[in-house]
Amino acid sequence: MRASEAAVERVTTRAFRIPTDAPESDGTLEWDATILVLAEVSGGGQTGLGYTYASAAAREVITEALAGAIAGRDAFDVPRLWAEMAGKVRNLGWRGVCACAISAVDVALWDLKAKLLELPAVRLLGAQRGEVTIYGSGGFTSYTDKRLKDQLACWAGRDGCKAVKMKVGRDLARDPERVAVARSAIGGAELYVDANGALNRKQALAFAQNCYDLGVTWFEEPVSSDDLDGLRLMRDCAPPGIEIAAGEYGYEPYYFRRMLEARAVDVLQADATRCGGFTGFLKAAALAEAFAVPFSAHTAPALHLHAAAAAPQLKNLEWFYDHVRIENMLFDGAPRPVKGAICPDLSTPGLGLAFKEKDAEKFAI
């Protein structure tokens, strides 16, 4: 098919509120539901889908600002359309909700282009690997010790994950005990902790020392990700066996560049549902490669899979409990882990995901 035969004909969006199966919290936030905003882009007889986990306000951004920016344009020119969308929200503020809205539409455009070319998305993006290593992620601060232990043990056992992650930072006095419970449950798997920026620098340094004694190898957002000097301090002063990770709240390439220039992280994270979809995600991956820093994909594993398989020097992909549950509920084709990894479906064009309309109806906003 020629590009001239594939103009963007229609952009639609819907939002869904999916309750959690129990109260959840981390070091700085509590929640009882997750909102998924779905974007669909049609052209050339095909429809691509993308989504973001964000405020339902992203729907209005897509409808009022983004749809008009790409309507009638060449569906094959995804990076150009990405730039058009970014320019369209200049006066609204590119970051935050607008970036999440762009992310959903950008992924839908890549899915559409791959379907038009009858290629799996990973081959369109440029495959670097046949499978993507995952790490189990959950261990919320609201969990009982039993649920914490059972959840992490399942990932390390049944799913074969070589690393699992838990939340810390809400109760510093009890966190070492919780970390010890987790450590006892996962055998030889690596243990990651994530404070979601809840700690100050002194607290984070002290906690890193305690965590190291319990075999922790990854400390995510020990301080706010906006505190680049604090992250650099942690990277320089934490025990050498602990990697400092951050980047999940990056919305544009400049954020990732500043973080890397500050030498603030051992592992750069990026989230394609926030940072401008696959176009922005691969920009972040290229920056990480240029700075020789390992790269990690944050949450939304079904959405990230094809782009993660195309990202240079990818370390891993977060198998986040909330999103895995939602993606299995609402999408046919959501990946299943085998020996701690997931693989793109090469037999299906695009992302290989189909939205379960009937199953989603009861969650519609």
Image (cartoon, rainbow, N blue to C red):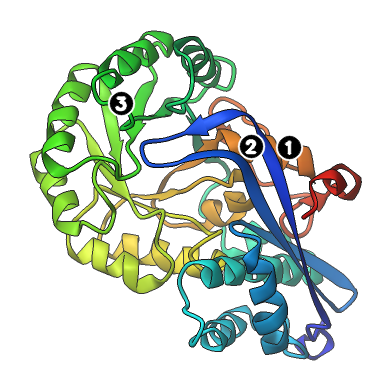
Badge number at residue 171: 3
* Residue 33, placed above or below residue 88: above
Residue drawn 58% across the image and 22% down it: 159
N-terminal of the pair, mark 3 or mark 2, is: 3
Callouts 2 and 1 close, C-beta under 8 Å: yes
| Residue at which label 2 appears | 324
Residue drawn 58% across the image and 57% down it: 54
Q: Left of 318 or right of it: where is 50?
A: right
Q: Secondary structure at mark 1?
A: helix
Quadrant the N terminus occupies: bottom right
* Residue 192, placed above or below residue 76: above
Residue type highlighted by circle 1? Asn
Measured as percent of width and height from the top left, residue 112 is found at 76, 69
Q: In this view of the protein, which residue sits in the foreground, 72 or 63?
A: 63
N-terminal of the pair, mark 1 or mark 3, is: 3
Residue drawn 70% across the image and 67% down it: 108
Q: Dividing the picture into quarters, in which one does residue 181 lie?
A: top left
